[in-house]
Image: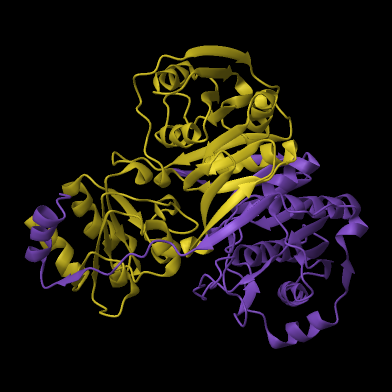
Chain colours: A yellow, B purple
Amino acid sequence: MTALVIAEHDNASLKGATLNTVTAAKACGGDVHVLVAGEGAAAAAQAAAQIAGVSKVIHADGASLKDGLAENVAAQVLAIAGNYSHILFPATAGGKNVAPRVAAKLDVAQISEITKVDSADTFERPIYAGNAIATVQSADAVKVITVRTTGFDAAAATGGSAAVESVAAVADSGKSSFAGREVTKSDRPELTAAKIIVSGGRALGSAEKFNEVMTPLADKLGAAIGASRAAVDAGYAPNDLQVGQTGKIVAPQLYIAAGISGAIQHLAGMKDSKVIVAINKDPEAPIFSVADYGLEADLFAAVPELVKAL
Amino acid sequence: MKVLVPVKRVVDYNVKVRVNSDGTGVDIANVKMSMNPFDEIAVEEAVRLKEKGVVTEVIAVSCGVDKCQETLRTAMAIGADRGILVETDAELQPLAVAKLLKALVDKEQPGLIILGKQAIDDDSNQTGQMLAALCDLPQATFASKVEVAGDKVSVTREVDGGLETVQLSLPAVVTTDLRLNEPRYVTLPNIMKAKKKQLDTVKPADLGVDVAPRIKTLKVSEPPKRSAGIKVPDVATLVDKLKNEAKVI
């Protein structure tokens, strides 16, 4: 029984989500191999070989894999899928894009966003925006899984010494091509990996105010910035900052929600945070029902005061 | 060019579901049901493509119980031209739905299939990608912009860290994200019109698809409750608590 983890990387370096996925793969019970599919991704493959508990890295390198197109990456996974009992992807935008293609081609069900491995065929996963937890058992020969990274600790990034085996990259499907990317440039920690997140809601009122109020707090705490769906929809913050059921799922040590009322869809994305602070002037805001520390105050006064006091 | 838009009947997004007393699922008796919000965005996008003259016919499809007819009528009130119900009382999992949809794609030969990226009940986020794989079609998930030009579609996608754009040859599968569009309100005249539109019913067996579930739900439980903490009177107390009690800063 061997599990295959599909590495999350940007060709240059391995992403943290890979480490949590390795932990989930280990819990399935057998050896763990990692597939690094990219172009010029040798450094990422070397990094994968260092992960504690990984016994082999398969490195597929070629132009067809450069931009992570779902058609090509799925074909690459399928080329080696026959050797594995479990195929695990991190539940990132990239993993969620590719995993169901692999499952459908193998004619097996996919188990999405697992938060716990009970046994080699039984897993726990949240449904209804995390308002219920389902324990599910798969009858298929191969388990194709996406892993909610907040449910698993990161495996140690060093200490392993797996062999790296190179395999040929698949041919391009010819049906899709990559046209461009607009990456949000930021020196801040990545939202899903941050220890502290400060998150703003609709009460900020404008993109200017959002930046003016939230940025100094994030700077002071070395935090990542998040936002509610309402704030993103209103254009106060870019889409990749959205925390919630259909945005990013986060579980930092400290989550500070400013001017966020706390719709169930937002709570679904952050309620596993260790400590939650809510700053809101509405005493009835649902966010207070999950907050460890609630401050009933106008955020435009309270947040700058907090920056000063830190 | 035809567009196929699959729509799912789900518990309304405003309902806070509760796990049922025997731990087999959630309580959905007497709960408001609606079209999955992402699917509503998919219908809206298809109808806009028709209004632009890019598309000639919008076909809405739903798989499930008889009541899914209501969901199809809503899709037709937004502007879909006709509906197909694949009727079954069986539990349908994403792989089975993708197989049913593939059978309809083979029959209807649409140039574009637009689906919601995920349903808000099982939160699977699988059906569109599975359908694309089964039909050997290219896919663009999590779309925030869709532009059809000739035999290609250019799709901007919401991904971790920003946006990316891919170009697909048609036919293709697109799944919608929240910011693709804002669905219109359905008006009473359009609801009345929708009642007269064509709605065909087929059974999974008619399409030659085995819908037997592959995943068994052993139990459904409440998530660990997070109890409300305390209210602090001012910023100074908050900082003190974070430093000395929670020790997180």
Q: Where is residue A167 in the image (x, y as percent from the top left)?
A: 62, 14
Please tell me whether residue B180 is drawn above or below residue A240 in the rendered image.
Answer: below
Q: Residue B199, percent across and down?
A: 86, 73
Q: Nearer the viewer, residue B25 or A219?
A: B25
Camera-side residue: B232 or B139? B232
| Horizontal arrangement in the rendering, residue B242 relative to residue A213 (left or right) | left
Please tell me which residue is depicted at 52% across the width and 72% down the height of the picture.
B17
Height in image: B53 above or below A143? below
Q: Position of residue A306 (x, y in %)?
A: 13, 60
Q: Looking at the picture, does residue B43 appear above or below residue B107?
A: below
Residue B217 visible here: yes
Q: In which quarter of the image is residue A159?
A: top left
Give the x, y percent position of residue B238: 12, 63
Name the residue rendered at 30%, 41% in the picture: A189
Whether residue B155 is visible: no
- Left or right, B227 with reference to A112: left
Residue in the image at 10% along x and 53% along y: B243
Q: Quadrant of the N terminus of chain A?
A: top right
B93 relative to A2, above or below: below
Residue at 73%, 53% (x, y): give it: B213
Q: How many marks?
A: 0
The residue closer to the viewer here, A134 or B143, is: A134
Q: In which quarter of the image is residue B85?
A: bottom right
Which one is nearer the viewer's eye here, A245 or B29? B29
